[in-house]
Image: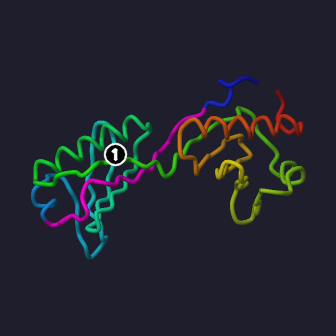
Amino acid sequence: MNENDLDVKIENIVASIEGIAESFDLNKIKEEIPDTEYNKNKFPGLVYRVKDPKAAFLIFSSGKINCTGSRSIEDVEKSCKILVKDLELIGYKPIKPEIIIQNVVASANLKSEVNLNEIASALTDDIEYEPEQFPGMVYRLRDMNIVVLIFGSGRLVITGARDTESVYIAAKKVRDKLLSLGILKS
């Protein structure tokens, strides 16, 4: 089994953007930027979407902005530039936009079914496995602050990473651990 056997795919990147403004007038943004959504009775933030590259921003009156839906850090950066340009057109003067990656979510495929009961017996620490409540196993890579959901199908969901490289390292760690325990066949 080699690196390509993991079939890792970035599914979503969540980032916060700071330094654009200390506060936002969400009603003004809604009026002046087309295709934005804001209804303070339903949600306290304004939704701003970028189609290419795909991203959604949640803009709050406090000046906080969150970005979700991108599949690469480059796409987060490109869509953030589009947002900043639109905000500049309606009078905001960004101080110094800074993108902070909060969470990279990815999937991976071990390309082999695994016996979760066998894993639970071998790895008593750092796992949670309640098959009556959830069909997967929660495996915490505490040294990386990453959580990996392991499913019997051999599929993994990796969350908590702060960069894309960590996702690949986490997938490899899980695969290598299962190989060393003899649970996954090479």
Specify the segment rendered in magenta: 8-27
Q: Residue at x 15, y 61 (%)?
A: 30
- Residue 5 at x, y = what percent? 68, 26
Q: Nearer the viewer, residue 86 or 39?
A: 86
- Residue 130 at x, y = what percent? 76, 63
Question: Is 145 left, or right, of 26 in this rendering?
Answer: right
Q: Residue at x 37, y 56 (%)?
A: 66
| Colouring scheme, one of rainbow, by chain, secondary structure, one colour | rainbow
> Given the image, on which type of amino acid does mark 1 rest?
Ala
- Name above or below for residue 173 compared with residue 149: above
Q: Residue at x 73, y 54 (%)?
A: 137
**Snapshot quadrant of residue 109:** top right
- Residue 87 at x, y = what percent? 17, 51
- Name above or below for residue 60 compared with residue 57: below
Which residue ends up furthest to the front in the rendered image?
95
Q: Nearer the viewer, residue 121 or 153?
A: 121
* Secondary structure at numbered mark 1: strand
Quickly name the residue at label 1. Answer: 55
Magenta-colored stretch includes residue 17:
yes
- Name above or below for residue 105 compared with residue 126: above
Magenta-colored stretch includes residue 15:
yes
Question: Is 117 left, or right, of 26 in this rendering?
Answer: right
**Snapshot quadrant of residue 53:** top left
Work out which quarter of the rendered image holds the N terminus and state it: top right
Question: Is 120 left, or right, of 133 in this rendering?
Answer: right
Q: Residue at x 24, y 47 (%)?
A: 83
- Residue 118 at x, y = what percent? 87, 49
